[in-house]
Amino acid sequence: MTIATPDIDTAVSRASNGTAMACLLGAGVGAFAMGAIVLLNETGLFAAPTLYAPAGGVTGRTTLATIVWLVSWGVLHHWWKARGVPPARVYAVTLILVALGVLGTFPPVWGLL
Amino acid sequence: MFTGRSLWTMVHGIGLGGGALMGMAAALFYLYAARVSAGSDSRTASRALARLTVATAAVLWLAVLLGTYIVFPPYRMTPPAGVTDLSQFPRALILANPDTAWLHTFAMESKEHMPWIAAMLTTAVAFISVRAPSRLLGDASLRNMAIGLLAIAFALVAFVSLMGVFVNKVAPLQ
C-alpha cells in the first residue's frame, strides 16, 4: 500500500511565508509601476507632476512608482503576514512584473509605441 | 583640480554605485555559498548577511537619490542663448553631435529609471534577510528567489554604471 506524503519542501516553503512573499511581490509591483508610469509618460497619456524642477519630470515619475511600491508592499503584507503563500507562483508573477517594468524603462521600447 | 560637481559625480558613481555593486556581488556569493554549507553556524551567517544586504540597499538608495537630485540637474541644464562652449552643459553637448546623441537618448534615459527598480529589489532581499534570516538561508525556494532578484538588480546596476562611464567620458560634469 502506498501512503501519500505531503511534499516536505513545499510545506516548509509555505509555512507562514507571507511576509517574505509580500515583500518580493511588492517589489515586482513597484518595478512594474515604474515601467508603466514611464511608458504612459512617453506616450503622452499621463505625466506625473515634477517635484523638483532642476531634475525635471523624473522626480515625479520615480516618486509615484516608489509610493505604489510601498503601498502595494504594505497591503500585501497586511493580507499575507500570517499566511502560507505558494512561493513558485509568487516568484513567477514577480519575475514577469519586473521584466515588464524593466522593458518599460528601456528607451528602445518607447520607439515601438 | 576637482570641481564640486565632478566630486559629486565621483561620489555617486565610484563611491556609492561601485559600493552597491560590490555589496550585491558579495551578497550573491554569500547566498550561493550558504546553499552548499548547510552545516555552518546559521545564526552568525544570517546576521552577517542581514548587515551586508541592508548596507548594500542603503548605499544603492543613496546612489539613486544622489544621482537623481544632485548629479542629474547640472547634467540637464539648458545653456543660455548664444553660448557656444557647451562643456558646462553635458546634455546639450552630447545632443549637439549626432554621433554622441545616443548617450542621452539611450544611456542617460536608461539611467533615469532603471536604478530605482534595482533599489526596490535589493531592499526586498534586505528586508527578508532581516525579518526571516534563518528561513532565507534554510529555505531553498526563498533563497533561490532572493538570488534571482538580487542578480537582476546587479545586472541593472552594472548596466547603468557602464552607461554612466560612457556619458562621463564624453561629457563629464566639470
Image (cartoon, coloured by chain):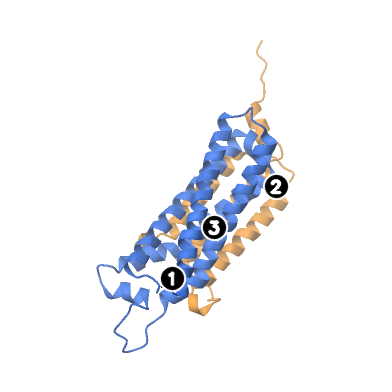
Q: Which residue is mark 3?
A: B60
Q: Amino acid at mark 2?
A: Trp
The tag on residue B6 is 1
Up/down of B30 relative to A104, above or below: above
**Residues beneath discs 2 and 1 located on the same chain:** no
Instruction: Using a 10 Å C-alpha cutoff, classify the residue at mark 2 as few (fewer than 14 neighbours), some (14 to 19) or many (20 or more).
Output: some
**Residues beneath discs 3 and 2 located on the same chain:** no
Q: Earlier in the sequence, mark 3 or mark 1?
A: 1
**Residues beneath discs 3 and 1 located on the same chain:** yes
Q: Which chain is orange?
A: A
Q: Nearer the viewer, mark 3 or mark 2?
A: 3
Badge 3 element? helix
**Chain hosting mark 2:** A
Count every numbered label the image shows and give the total. 3
Q: Tell me which residue sits at (57%, 41%) in the image.
A: A89
Q: Amino acid at mark 1?
A: Ser
Q: Quadrant of the C terminus of chain A?
A: bottom left
Q: Is residue B90 left or right of residue A71?
A: left
Residue B58, x across and y down, in percent = 60, 57
**Chain hosting mark 1:** B
Up/down of B8 relative to B25, above or below: below
Residue A10, x across and y down, in percent = 63, 31
Q: Tell me which residue sits at (54%, 57%) in the image.
A: B60
Up/down of A62 relative to A94, above or below: below
Q: Which residue is mark 2?
A: A80
Q: Amino acid at mark 3?
A: Leu
Residue A58, x across and y down, in percent = 49, 70
The tag on residue A65 is none
